[in-house]
Amino acid sequence: MAAERPEGPLLLPRVHTRREWGARPARRRAEVLDRAPDHIVVHHTSTPNVTDYSVDAAYDLSRAIQRFHMRTRGWNDAGQQLTISRGGHIMEGRNRSLTAILSGRHCVGAQALHHNDHTIGIENEGTYMTADVPGRLWESLVHTCAWLCDRYDLDPYQALVGHRDYGKTDCPGDVLYSRLPALREEVAGLLRFPSRKSAPRIDTDDLPADPGEAMPSGTAFPERHGR
């Protein structure tokens, strides 16, 4: 990156580990590549826009996502590397994700069809087709993306994309997707990266269908929401 960078690495955000939120054992250890990802994919979970912003609710979310991915989708573990709750709590998703990030390597997830070998995914709790993003979540998303760009030496104007850039899906919702330019600007500001308006160059022709959300609406907490 050609920009003047802050002195030293950006402060590591508070990331709640799999042990903390009570992850079940993965069926298989995730593959970790000896290189960095080149894009950060922003998702929404397509779940209810809850008003419980507690860390306990965030832990419930991570367990529900992992349960859905393993039981319903048949995956080896949670698909995404990181999850941010509506209360702004950041959780490790797929096994080995946090260790890989801290070592500058890429933990391969299952969050962007045909692009998992070079992208890292952030699930943002909620459904953002019409609703706006809570301030706590947005602040954590900005700092998480800045941390990842710093750790992986990525250009935020090119690296930050939405899930729909890689597949035919509503994810991350019209509202959150429309805020990606602002996300790039805020991340660039934290990194002291030169401001510019260029967008990521992604070929959007013949995109594959990819439902992609962490869970269909209403399935996050069936025992809590009665769905």
Image (cartoon, helix red, strand yellow):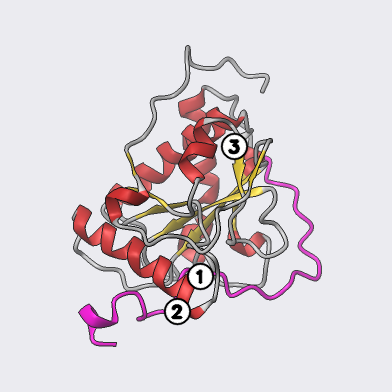
Which sits earlier in the primary sequence, circle 2 or circle 3?
Answer: 3
Task: Please state if 124 lies on the left or on the right of 35 as rendered.
Answer: left
Query: Range of the magenta residues?
Result: 198-227
What residue sits right under mark 2 in the picture? 216
Measured in 3D between alpha carbons, the distance from the residue under mark 1 to the one under mark 3, in whole angstroms, is: 23 Å
Q: Residues within 10 Å of mark 3 (few under 14, many from 20)?
A: many
Note whether 30 is above or below 98 in the view shown.
Answer: below
Q: Position of residue 77 (x, y in %)?
A: 50, 63
Q: Residues within 10 Å of mark 1 (few under 14, many from 20)?
A: many
Q: Secondary structure at mark 3?
A: helix
- The first of marks 1 and 3 along the sequence is 3
Q: Residue at x 34, y 74 (%)?
A: 220
Name the secondary structure under disc 1: loop
Q: Does the magenta-highlighted stretch encompass residue 211?
A: yes
Whether residue 168 appears in this view of the structure is yes
Identified by mark 1, the residue type is Glu
Q: Is residue 11 left or right of residue 208?
A: left
Q: Are marks 1 and 2 in contact (CB under 8 Å)?
A: yes
Which is more toward the observer, 198 or 29?
A: 29
Residue beneath label 3, please? 156
Picture coordinates of residue 14 (x, y %)? 32, 37
User: Measuring 76% from the left and 62% from the top, which residue is drawn there?
Assistant: 204
Could you say which disc has been placed on residue 134 in the image?
none
Q: Secondary structure at mark 2?
A: loop
Q: Quote the CA–CA distance across marks 2 and 3.
A: 29 Å
